Image (cartoon, helix red, strand yellow):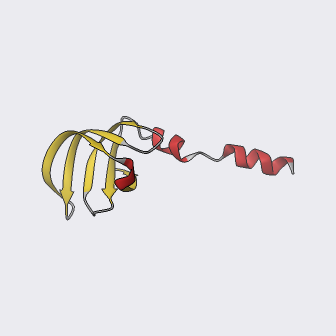
Amino acid sequence: MEGQNQSKEAMPRPLDALNESRGKQVMVELKNGKQFVGKLIAFDIHINTVLEDAQELEAGEVKRNIGKVFIRGDTIVIISPSA
């Protein structure tokens, strides 16, 4: 029993995993299919997200440079480290 409790405590929480990407390049995909790439500078418990030096992608190519962008958390489907 005791070993099971220790393994559960070691599991990262979702916000901990997202916090590891703070200050790094991430890709954010929205429910409407739009994708943005930029440096993750902030997020909150609702996953409202702020990216810096953001670019909107279309078919994997840069469609436009946006700069700093706030993305509402309930529109986000995926946040992934950028390659």
Q: Give residue 30's quadrant in the image.
A: bottom left
Comparing 44 with 80, the one in front is 44
Comparing 49 with 7, the one in front is 49
Comparing 1 with 47, the one in front is 47
Q: Position of residue 65 (x, y in %)?
A: 14, 45
Rendered view: 63 above or below 46: below
Q: Position of residue 29 (x, y in %)?
A: 32, 57
Rendered view: 6 above or below 29: above
Most extreme residue toward the right, as rendered? 1
Most extreme residue toward the left, as rendered? 64
| 65 left or right, relative to 9 | left
Which residue is depicted at the point 71% across and 49% down?
8
Which residue is depicted at the point 32% across and 51% down?
27
| 48 left or right, relative to 17 | left
Which residue is depicted at the point 42% across and 45% down?
47
Q: Give residue 38's quadrant in the image.
A: top left
Q: Position of residue 37 (x, y in %)?
A: 27, 48
| 36 left or right, relative to 16 | left
| 82 left or right, relative to 63 | right
Q: Position of residue 5 (x, y in %)?
A: 79, 47
